[in-house]
Image (cartoon, rainbow, N blue to C red):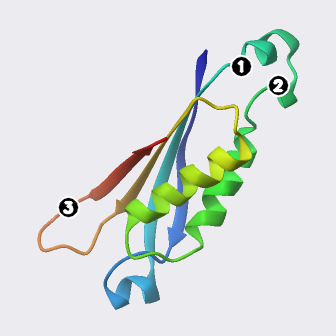
Amino acid sequence: MGIINVNGIRVYAYHGCLPEETKIGGEYVVDVSIETDFSKAAESDDLSETVDYCTVNEIVRTEMTLPSKLIEHVAKRIADHLRKKFPAVKLFRVTVTKINPPMNGAVDSVSVVVEG
């Protein structure tokens, strides 16, 4: 068993409850942690025996293009898409971070974590 981390996927997207957020958009960072058995890949040096993190990046970018009110919803969609693409994976942890959210006060970011 091992863990593959794909961290810091930076995306400009249009999520939020405020109308302005879906018009002007904002910066997001997505991190994906994948718990899986990649022992065969470690032995064989064969990409087909593990999770291709380029595909993970593509899935994140695809799901981030679909506007949602809540980043909770976006994170769940990403996890569901990953689960469908990689059914042998034991656990996915998806963190979606919204940079500089429009809030009263100085807040660097907010994030949600979905596991599944």
Classify 10 Å Cα crowding around label 3: few (below 14), some (14-19), many (20 and above).
few
Which label lies toward us, 1 or 3?
1
* For residue 56, side relative to residue 69 (left or right): right
Instruction: Identify the amino acid type marked 1.
Output: Phe
Please name whichever residue, 112 or 79, is drawn nearer the observer in this view of the structure: 79
Q: Position of residue 104 (x, y in %)?
A: 12, 74
Q: What SS does tag 3 mark?
A: loop
Looking at the rendering, in which quadrant would you find the N terminus? top right
The residue under label 2 is 49
The quarter holding residue 64 reads bottom right
Classify 10 Å Cα crowding around label 2: few (below 14), some (14-19), many (20 and above).
some
The residue under label 1 is 38
- Real-space Cα separation, disc 1 to disc 2, in angstroms: 7 Å
The residue under label 3 is 107
* Residue lying farthest to the top in this orientation: 43
Q: Is residue 113 above or below residue 92?
A: below
Q: Earlier in the sequence, mark 2 or mark 3?
A: 2
Q: Is residue 63 above or below residue 92?
A: below
* For residue 71, side relative to residue 4 (left or right): left
- Real-space Cα separation, disc 1 to disc 3, in angstroms: 38 Å
Q: Which residue lies at the image location 70% right of the left edge and 31% below the top edge?
A: 88
Q: Earlier in the sequence, mark 1 or mark 3?
A: 1
Q: Which residue lies at the image location 55% right of the left edge and 50% below the top edge?
A: 79
Whether residues under marks 2 and 3 lie with C-beta atoms below 8 angstroms apart, the answer is no
Q: Earlier in the sequence, mark 1 or mark 2?
A: 1
Which label lies toward us, 2 or 3?
2
Q: Is residue 78 above or below residue 93?
A: below
Instruction: Identify the amino acid type marked 3.
Output: Val
Q: What SS does tag 1 mark?
A: loop
Q: Which residue lies at the image location 60% right of the left edge and 64% below the top edge?
A: 63
Q: Position of residue 101 (x, y in %)?
A: 29, 69
Whether residues under marks 1 and 2 lie with C-beta atoms below 8 angstroms apart, the answer is yes
